Image: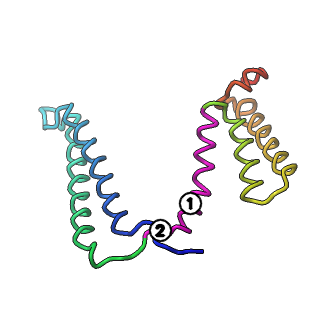
Amino acid sequence: MNERALISRTSMEVATALVTGIAGAAVLLGAVEHDIGWGDSGPASGYFPFRIGVLIVLASLINLVIALRRRSADHSTFVTNVQMRSVLAFGLPILGFVIVSSFLGLYVGTILYLALVMIFQGGYRPVYAIGFALAVAVAMRLLFPIWFKVPLLTGPLEALLGLY
């Protein structure tokens, strides 16, 4: 396999500094909607969030400057294309599980996720994978909504079958 660098360490450090800086700016903007000073009874509601936002922005700026100053000397790799394929092989099915579960319910999402991952990534025979996925869904149904009285996200199939 080709171990070509996909993302450099410097690029990821710059991206991380920018994202944390934006998060810090969001904290600042949220804090200034409230009083950020000190009142007669102590700090106002925006006092601590404002200071935390300032710290986050300052730390992000320092990290950005360090990453940019070091970019010509540091040519290390953050992730290779082979490593990224492994991450995506794990992350994309989970993203699909979340999307399917949002529309079709947690039971259907669980069955599809487990069966497909077991078949395509685990190499299990479809009969075993589907059987296991169905067993997990039944166990979830018994354990959470019936025994613990904790309802799970249901979808149109559960409604059609009367499972609430």
Residue at image mark 2: 79
- Colouring used for the render: rainbow
The answer to if 82 sits in the magenta stretch is yes
The amino acid pointed to by label 2 is Val
Residue 85 lies, in percent from the top left, at 57, 62
Residue 6 lies, in percent from the top left, at 46, 67
Specify start and end residues of the magenta stretch as a single range.
78-102
Q: Residue drawn at (19%, 35%), measured in percent from left and top?
A: 32
Query: What secondary structure is the magenta-colored segment mainly?
Result: helix
Dot 1: element:
helix
Residue 55 lies, in percent from the top left, at 22, 53
Q: Distance between the residues labelled 1 and 2?
A: 10 Å
76 on left or right of 52: right
Label 1: how many Cα within 10 Å (few below 14, some 14–19, many 20+) = few
The answer to if 118 sits in the magenta stretch is no
For the C terminus, the image quarter is top right
Question: Eyeballing the image, is 70 above or below 163?
Answer: below
Dot 2: element:
strand
The reply to whether callout 1 and callout 2 are in contact (CB within 8 Å) is: yes
Residue at image mark 1: 87
